[in-house]
Image (cartoon, grey):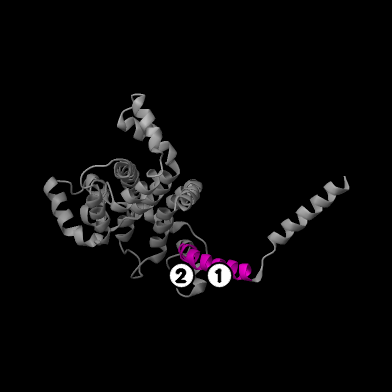
Amino acid sequence: MSATLSSNVEARVRVSQTRRLHPDRLLVHLILLFWCLISIFPLLWMMGVSLKPVTEPIGGLGSMIPQRVTLTNFERVSTLMPLARNTLNSLIVATFGTLTTVFLCALGGFAFAKYNFPGKNFLFNLLIATMLIPPEAGIVPTFMIMRGLGWINNYLSLIVPRAATAIGIFYMRQYISSFPNEVMEQARLDGCSEFRIFWNMVLPVVFPALAAWATLVFIARWNDFMYPLLFMTSKNMFTLMVAISKLPVSESLSTPWPIIMAGSVIAVFPLILIYLLMQRFQVSGLQLGAVKG
């Protein structure tokens, strides 16, 4: 009995010692806390300004604390632009763009990871080389192609051009390459088709990577500004980000920042919600990548 008590006391002492922060760990925590405050400050400033009346001055650190809280700015956003339609446009583009990109990138990564075909290494190296080309370099030819296809003011112009990306295929290839080849051979002997192996066996195993990549793609598609600005010319076809940038200046001020910040809060809220819901997949995907590395 005494031996058990002593072992429990020693275990508690070890736990308490491990919980203590050493000076080096304390410094790291302070640096991380400072960096988190810097990262979250723009969001706090945006939320504070969105609750200020348009007549209240904006400037300095004190401007993030409204002297008089009001929700009028959020009401003005809905009257100055078709908020529901613009939000629906962003949701459609982000959702279908994410589903298409994740599926095609996973399919391409599966092909590069598990099949041997002539020119495989050359094609993969060529694919990786395209990551060095800035997206801005393809704006003009992409616009001409979309106009030739009649896809201006069409959701397809925002989904199809980036349906599969080099970084997405590379990302999925790294995860799928660790899937056992023996399991695939056994499935082929049992009569499974290649697509069934991919859909029913490979994808469930790499689901954390899929979810992590889907989260990143959804955020990128939702925040996209350049392509919707070029390909959508009608106010009812604007995405939320473009619509906010085109809010009419109807106040006495040159730029009604409280109203713009209110629209920005509305645009950011779904992203925060999506990230909180998918955070565990982000962590598990990073941990899985670390183990594979």
Q: Position of residue 175 (x, y in %)?
A: 40, 46
Q: Amino acid at mark 1?
A: Ile
Residue 31 tag number: 1
Q: Which residue is mark 2?
A: 56
Q: Residue at x 48, y 75 (%)?
A: 60
Nearer to the camera, 42 or 238: 42
Few, some or many residues within 10 Å of mark 1 (<14, 14–19, 20+) = few
Q: Residue at x 55, y 70 (%)?
A: 31
The reply to whether discs 1 and 2 touch (Cβ–Cβ < 8 Å) is no
Q: Main secondary structure of the magenta part?
A: helix
Quadrant (top left, top right, bottom left, bottom right) of the N terminus: top right
Residue placed most toward the observer, 273 or 20? 20
Q: Is residue 16 above or below residue 188?
A: below
Residue 292 at x, y = what percent? 45, 50
Q: Kindly identify the amino acid type of the residue bearing the numbered disc 2.
A: Glu
Judged from the image, the secondary structure of the residue bearing numbered disc 1 is: helix
Q: Which residues are magenta?
A: 24-46
Residue placed furthest toward the bottom: 60
Of badges 1 and 2, the one in the foreground is 1
Q: Does the magenta run of residues contain 70?
A: no
As drawn, which residue projects farthest toward the right?
A: 2
- First of labels 1, 2 by sequence position: 1
